[in-house]
Amino acid sequence: MEQEEITRVLQRINEAWIMGYADQIPRAMDDCFDDRMVIKGSDFQTLGTGKAACIQSYVDFVNSARIKGCTLSTPHVEVTGDTAVATYSWQLTYDQNGKEHKDSGNDLFVFARADGRWLAVCRVMIPAAAQ
């Protein structure tokens, strides 16, 4: 049951940005992230901190790119008490700055349960080129 709840949060996050409506992303994602959310890059450098910055990163991407296709694997979720880790792979094709890009990689999300809800507290983006 907990794994399904976390999978639903991930689906909500991913559907919001894949559908490409930047103005709808903040409302769709607001209940998905902890206020102290952290985004990390492939070498674990901090790319952003806070819920607002995390949501804005999705908005910025959608505003700068046209998504042509995205495939996500089924998330693998491990729960221990009030903490969970979810991982999945992705393949993404998009146009940005007049060029087509084809990227792939993995995402790792850390979740914490607060007041009966699962909230993302950390996302690590690992492009295939960095693996």
Image: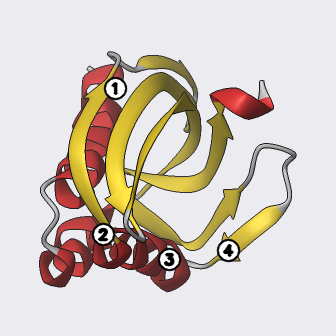
Tell me what residue is drawn at x 48 percent, y 22 percent.
89
Q: Amino acid at mark 3?
A: Lys
Query: What's under tag 1, amino acid-wise?
Result: Glu
- First along the sequence among labels 2 and 1: 1
Of badges 4 and 3, the one in the foreground is 4
Q: How is the image coloured?
A: secondary structure
* Quadrant of res 8: top left
Q: Earlier in the sequence, mark 3 or mark 2?
A: 3
Q: Say if 11 sits above or below 85 in the image.
A: below
- For marks 1 and 3, the one nearer the N-term is 1
Mark pair 2, 4: CA separation: 17 Å
Query: Which amino acid is tagged 2?
Result: Val
Three-letter amino acid code at the position of disc 4: Gly
Q: CA distance from mark 4 to mark 3?
A: 9 Å
Instruction: Point out which mark residue 2 bears.
Output: 1
User: Alpha carbon of mark 1 to alpha carbon of mark 3: how far?
Assistant: 22 Å
Label of residue 62 in the image = 2
x%, y% of residue 68? 20, 45
Sequence-first tag of 2 and 4: 4
Q: Position of residue 109 (x, y in %)?
A: 56, 40
Label pair 1/3, CB-CB below 8 angstroms: no
Q: Which residue is mark 3?
A: 51
Which residue matches tag 4? 48
Element carrying mark 1: helix
Asked if the residue under mark 1 is in contact with the one under mark 4, i.e. CB atoms within 8 Å, the reply is no
Q: Position of residue 1 (x, y in %)?
A: 26, 20
State the separation of the CA atoms marked 3 and 2. Answer: 17 Å
Residue 61 falls left or right of residue 85: left
Q: Residue at the location (24% across, 52% down)?
A: 67
* Cα distance between the residues tagged 2 and 1: 30 Å
